[in-house]
Amino acid sequence: MIHLNHINVTFGRPVLRDAEIRIPRGKVTAITGDSGCGKTTVLYILGMMSSQQDLQYIYDGKAIDLHDRAECRRLAREEFGFLFQDHSLIETLTISENLIQLAALAKRKLTDSEIDSLLKEVDLDPAQKNAYPKQLSGGEQQRAALAGVLARKPRCLFADEPTSALDRTNTQKIIQIFKRLAERGITVVIASHSDAMCDAADCLYHVEDQKIVLDRGSVDDSSTEPESAVRTAPYGLPNLFRYVKKSQKKGKILKGLIVTFCALAIAGFSLTNTVMDTLQNQQRNLLNQISEREIFVLNQEHPTDTILDADGNPVLTDEELEKMHALSGVEEIMPFYEFRSFSLLGNQTGPSAEVIAETSEGEHKRSFSLEDAAFPYFVVQPYHTEQKIPAQAEILFDAAKSDPEHAVYLSHDFAEALELENASGSVTLKTQVYVPVRKLHSTMQINHSEENADYDISEATEIEVPVAGILPYEVVNRYSINGNRIIYMPEAEMERIREKCAAKNEETDYSSLAQNGESLLRWMPSACLVFASDYDGINAIKSKLGNLSPKFITRCDYQDTVGMDQMLAGIKSTSTIILTIVVCIIFVLMSAVFISQTLARKREFALLKANGMQEHNLVRMMIVESLWQSMHILLTALLISIVLSVISTQLLLASVSLFSAKTILYVLCSAVLFVLIPTLAGIAVTLRVQPDRILRS
C-alpha cells in the first residue's frame, strides 16, 4: 500500500492543501477531476516523478524520506513503472531495443523469448519487435510503451492519461491489460478523464476543493503479491555504448554536416597554427643564419679602450668556464688562443723566418720572408663551424672538398702576401709557429693596486697544412692585436696540435723564466668565444657574463636585427590574434551546436531519468557520445588537413610540408577540447532536466 498524507501543492495558487490518499496493493485505482485540479500532480508524486517534498510518503508501511534522492530513485527504478500520456519510447531504438534498454535500467536482462512474451501480453505481434516506434499506430505505440514498463518488473504501475489519444477499441485493450496486471498483484494507478477507465477501476478518487476524495471502492490491500524480480545486472558501460551507437543513427545527415563543419574548422585552425609556426621558424632560422651569434669574452684585469686578446691577460679558470657553460641560452664555448709567428717566452724566441706555399701548378713554390716584410707577423686562429668561415671563402682550392677537417683558410692579406690570389688546384702551406704550452704568472702594481698578469710560454712547431680557400677583405682579425695576416684552422685540428706540443714539452724545465715572485701555471686561455643558441638571446647572455665576474669584458659584432625582430613580433601577434578568433568562433559554434542538440533531446533525457537512469550514467553517456563524435571529427579533420596541406604546399609553400606530427597533435587536442568543453555545458543542462516538468508539457 502507498499512503500519502499532508499533501500541499502550490502552483502560483493552492492546488492541494493537507490532502491525503491511500493506494491499495493489487487493484486498479483511478484518479479523476477537472483540468488543473492536481490529479496528474498526485500521480507524479506517487510515482516518485515529482520534486514535491511537502508531504508524508509511506510505502508498504515504511516512511520514505523524500529528501533521500538515492532511495527515491531506487524506488522509481526498481519498484515503480510509469506510463506517460505520450508513449515513452526512444525513437532511435527498435521495440525490442527499447525493451532491453528499459529492463537494463532496472538491472534486468531480457531474453528473446521474454521479449516475445511481453509483446503478447500487451496484444502485440512478436514480429513487430524489430520495428521502430514511428512504424506503429498510436495504440500499438502505447501498448509497446506499456511492454517496456512491464519489462522492468514493477510492483506499482502509474499511468498518466494512457487512453487520451486512443479509440474505443484500443482503450478497451489497455483496460483489460491493467486488470490482468492487478490480478497478478501489481498495483495500477491511473490519472484519467476517461469514463470507461474510471468505470473499470476498483477504486475511484476525484480531486475537488484542494482535497482528494474517495468516491468508490475499498482501500484494503489485495491478498495477491506480485512476482518478485531478479535484479543482478547493473547498468554499465556496455549498455551505454550500445545505446550511444543506436542513438547516433538519428539525424545522420545533420550530424554528418556538423561533423564536417567542425572538422573543417579544426583543420583550418590546426593548419593556421602550423603555417604560423612554420613562418616563425623560417624567420628565426633566417635571422640565425644572417646574424653572428658569437660573443667574445676576455678576462681583462685592467680594462682598456680596446677589447682584444694580448699577452698578459689573466687566464680563465675551469670554474669560470663551467659557469659560462651553465648559463641559459649558451650553446657552446670555444677557447680562443693563437699560434703565432713569434714568441716572447720559451726555449726559442723570435719570429719565424719563412712561410712556403706549394701549389699543384708545376710544383711551383712561393715563399714569403717575414724578415723583409713591413709587418713581419702572422697568427693561426681557431674557427668554429658556427662562424661559417668556409661559406665566406671567395676562392676555394681542392682541399675544401678533399680534406675539410684539416684544411685551413687564409685571410686576404696573407694570401696576397703569398701571391696566391690566382692560384688553383691544391695548395699546401709550410711554416713554423709558436704553440702555447704553459703560462707564466706574475703580479704588477698599477695605480697603487696589485693586478695579475699571465703570459704564454710557447714552443716552436713545424706545421704543414692544406689550404682550403681564401677569405675576402671583409674578414679581418677582430679578437687580437696581431694584425690581419691570419691562418684560420679548424678548432679541433688546432687543439690537437697544441695538446701534442704540450705533451712533448711536459718535462721541459721553465723554472729559469720564473723570477721575482713569478710562478708557472698549466696553460689556460684568457679568452673564449661563447655561442648563443639563438640570436635573440645574445644580449641576455652578455648581461649574465658580466654578472659572473667584473673582469669579464664582452664584445659582440652581431648584426642589428631590430627591424626583423619587429617583423617576427608582428607575425607572432598576427598569428595569435587569428588563432584566438578561430578558437573563439569554433568554441562558440560548438557550444551552440551541443547545447542545441541537448535541448532537442530533453524529452529523451527526461524519459531515461523517469525510467531509472541515474545521473552519473547520464553524464557517462554524454561523455561517451562526446568521445564518439570527437573520433569522427578527428578522423575527418585529419583527412581534410592532409588534403589542405597538400594543396597549400603545392600552391604556397612548395618547400615546406605543412602536415606533420605537430599538425596531428593540434587536430587531436582541438577535436577533444572543442567537443568536450561544450559537452560540459550540455551536461549541466541535462542534469537540470526534471521529468515531471518535461513529460507533462
Image (cartoon, rainbow, N blue to C red):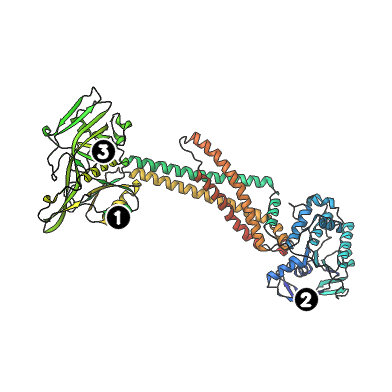
Q: Which residue is mark 3?
A: 489
Which amino acid type is marked by label 1?
Lys
For numbered disc 1, what is the local secondary structure?
helix
Foreground pick, 490 / 135: 490
Residue 606 in the image: above or below residue 356: below
The disc, 2 or 1, on the residue closer to the chain's N-terminal end is 2
Residue 281, image x and y in percent?
A: 42, 43
The disc, 2 or 3, on the residue closer to the chain's N-terminal end is 2
Q: Which residue is mark 2?
A: 19
- Tell me if I can see residue 543 in this picture: no
Residue 96, image x and y in percent?
A: 78, 54
Determine whether, in the image, residue 225 is placed left or right of residue 560. right
- Which quadrant, please, contains the C terminus? bottom right
For numbered disc 2, what is the local secondary structure?
strand
Foreground pick, 116 / 613: 116
Comparing marks 3 and 1, which lies closer to the viewer? 3
Which amino acid type is marked by label 3?
Met
Which amino acid type is marked by label 2?
Ala
Residue appearing at x 39%, y 47% in the figure: 569
Inter-mark Cα distance, 2 to 3 = 105 Å
Q: Which residue is mark 1?
A: 323
Q: How many numbered circles does the render carry?
A: 3
Furthest residue toward top:
362
Q: Residues within 10 Å of mark 1 (few under 14, many from 20)?
A: few
- Which quadrant, please, contains the N terminus? bottom right
Inter-mark Cα distance, 2 to 1 = 87 Å
Residue 68 in the image: above or below residue 572: below
- Tell me if I can see residue 397 in this picture: yes
Q: Residues within 10 Å of mark 3 (few under 14, many from 20)?
A: many
Comparing marks 2 and 1, which lies closer to the viewer? 1
Residue 148 in the image: above or below residue 271: below
